[in-house]
Image (tube, rainbow, N blue to C red):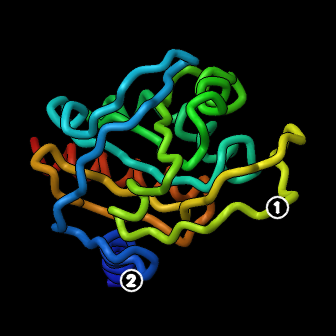
Amino acid sequence: MKRSLIACGLAALLASPAFAALKVGDTAPTFTAPASLAGKRFDYSLQEGLKKGPVVVYFYPSAFTGGCNLQAHTFAVKHAQFTAAGASIVGVSLDSIARLDEFSADPQYCGGKVAVASDVDGKIARAYDLKVREAVAGRKDTRGAELDHGYAERSTFIVTPDGRIAATVGDVSPVDNVDRALEAVQKLARSSR
């Protein structure tokens, strides 16, 4: 009984977080954006990604900041587990594509395993009903470079190949965000067998 209550609580948390207006079953806004993988630029298309399977679309405040560094690294370390569950991953932030070229290639962060897309005007984040904050003068990243862009709230959406949101994750630590996203895609993989 206790175990089933815990499972129900986790399912409810994954399914309907308080942070995001988009809910399970909603249509995920499609987007195309400049992106980088292993320091190489390309045009990322969610629609194309969904042709291959579920996509983990994770929004994060900024490359080269404490929590975002940890989250990107954790996604990179667990990349093979996401792939085994049939899912791909794309990170989205308001960083410039030049910053993302470095971030995507750095072995301490994305390690050439996780694609990151540039949403400089916050249009994609807002389409997912996420809060976007303006840049704060004088704020610096972990390398000492000034952060001159806005920030989207840390939120992850699991999008199924039919373009629907299967799960959302937010209001948790960067590592828990990755772990819960992995649980969601593994659950999708089990249910599709």
Instruction: Please name the amino acid that badge 2 sits on.
Output: Lys
Position of residue 30 measured from the top left corner of the image (x, y, whole percent): 23, 48
Q: Mark 1 points at which residue?
A: 137
Question: Disc 2 on helix, strand or loop?
Answer: helix
Depth check, mark 1 against mark 2: the one in front is 1
Question: Residue at image x 19%, y 46%?
Answer: 190
Q: Residues within 10 Å of mark 2 (few under 14, many from 20)?
A: few
In the picture, which quadrant includes the C terminus?
A: top left
Question: Disc 1 on helix, strand or loop?
Answer: loop
Question: Residue at image x 35%, y 83%?
Answer: 5
Q: Residues within 10 Å of mark 1 (few under 14, many from 20)?
A: few
Instruction: Please name the amino acid that badge 1 sits on.
Output: Ala
- The label shown at residue 34 is none
Q: Which of 85 and 24 is in front in this view?
A: 24
Q: On the rendered structure, is 138 left or right of 84?
A: right
Whichever of callouts 1 and 2 sits on the residue coming sooner in the sequence is 2
Q: Which of 4 and 90 is in front in this view?
A: 90
Q: On the rendered structure, is 20 left or right of 177?
A: left
Distance (Cα) linking label 1 and label 2: 49 Å
Q: Which of 59 and 41 is in front in this view?
A: 41
Q: In which quarter of the image is residue 161?
A: top left
Q: On the rendered structure, is 25 left or right of 17?
A: left
- The label shown at residue 2 is 2
Question: Residue at image x 50%, y 71%?
Answer: 131
Position of residue 112 measured from the top left corner of the image (x, y, whole percent): 55, 20
Position of residue 9 measured from the top left corner of the image (x, y, whole percent): 37, 80
